[in-house]
Image (cartoon, grey):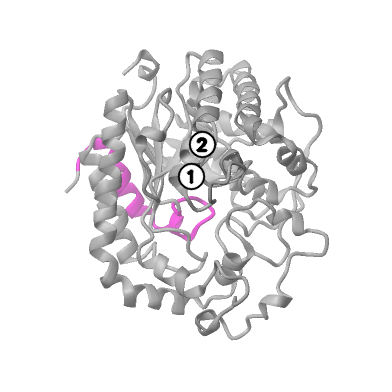
Amino acid sequence: MSNKFSTLPRKLTITMWDFSWYTMTLPGEPYHDLEARFKEAVDRGYNTIRICAMPFLLFTAEGKRPGPLHFGSLGAVGQRTRWYNCRGGAVLDGHAHLLELFRQAKAHNCYIMLSSWEYQQSPSFLAHPALRDELAAIAPEDRCMAIARSMDQLIRYVKNAGYGEQIVYAELHNEVEFGQLTAVGTEQGISPSYVPGLVQAVRPYVEEAVGFLRTAHPDLLITASYTLNEAYPKAYLPDNFEVAHFHLYIKGVLNELTAAAGLEDESVFPNEFVRSMLRDDAPPFSEWQLPPGQEWRMEGNPVGLRLIYLHDWADPVKWDLFLYDKYGQHKIAMLEKADTRLEEAHEWAQQHGIPVVIGEGYVGYTPLHAGFEEGPVGKFIAEYALRKGIALGFWGMTLCSNCAPHHPFWDDIEWQRKWNAAILQHSVE
């Protein structure tokens, strides 16, 4: 490995604070007190915090944007989901909040993994649509470079404040193949569901943007984030990454549930299966909407209102019972998918002489109060993936996307300590 690794941890234990670290900052919300959250993270064995650094929200290609950020919410929508359940109403000095994050990282001997969710979810939580509109107005072929230029300014800002050594690496964007960066492919007629075509279409633009950041910051590791969720040739990925950063959502049994819900068919949602899963007090889907004039919040957001409705109003017990009942039919295929996709990532990274990091995983997106992923089966799947990654010598692993201060799994302290220690010691029982 290059000398860029000389001051970085031998292994990364990652907790993902995504965009919640700036959308949930009001008194009583998880990230009102960053110092307390860092103390908890270190106590659980983490040394790396992965965030949407909001580069475009904070910086233009020339420097800082003026003024504070004003945040909203989806109103009553999303309050029993993960990530979408912020209260809204905060007025935040985003630049100061960013530097406080880095100040606490340095004080607690932690590192920050920079990313961006700005062509996906994060603009949904702004109080006003101006910045979202500005992002959407950028021509698809220019979007990667727009994020790169803002990320460049953010990195310069962090370095000038004396915290550059706390950046473990920078990702151009989160999950490139899902979100509005892929418009370069869909405008060519590629189906939004055809992942190999989208990965291939966006490649030159990602490669250009990563190259720009590598030139601007030769002292830092630069990459972009992709998933291992769907099959696609890894040869379609850019060749200039310095870290093979992947996410692995195995789904399996979860796909059976979402398929039964008919989320792709607007004409029949909610279908009979969905109605059978709902809480007794669930409102009709037709009456459960964003506040008037707020429809822009979900434009371009890859999650969609139908899935959020299901998460908000599904009875968590019914949800978990369905997954437990059906899991046995999917178990072998789910474990085989973990083996295959992690081995593919390892092989591609070896060919490029770069380390592998798994930054998100492992079952999939579940309601806030559902316990399947935090329960015995979810932990078994996570542990299976962790053992595999440790055996393959991956540089960094997340224990689970839900192991963060804004999820109930954060309270399972001993499990996190155990598996972070296993990663750091590069050993499994």
Residue name at image x 72 percent, y 41 percent: 136
The stretch drawn in magenta includes residue 424:
yes
Q: Quadrant of residue 208?
A: top right
Q: Amino acid at mark 2?
A: Ala
Percent position of residue 429, x then y: 16, 48
Q: Is residue 238 above or below residue 13?
A: above
Q: Quadrant of residue 143?
A: top right
Residue pointed to by mark 2 = 201
Q: Is residue 161 visible?
A: yes
**Residue closest to the eye, 148 or 14:** 148
Q: Is residue 236 above or below residue 331?
A: above
Q: Position of residue 177 (x, y in %)?
A: 50, 43
Q: Is residue 368 above or below residue 209?
A: below
In the rendered image, which residue does mark 1 sit on? 16
Where residue 201 appears, as percent x and y from the top left, is: 51, 36
Circle 2 Cα neighbour tier, 10 Å, few/some/many (<14 / 14–19 / ≥20): many
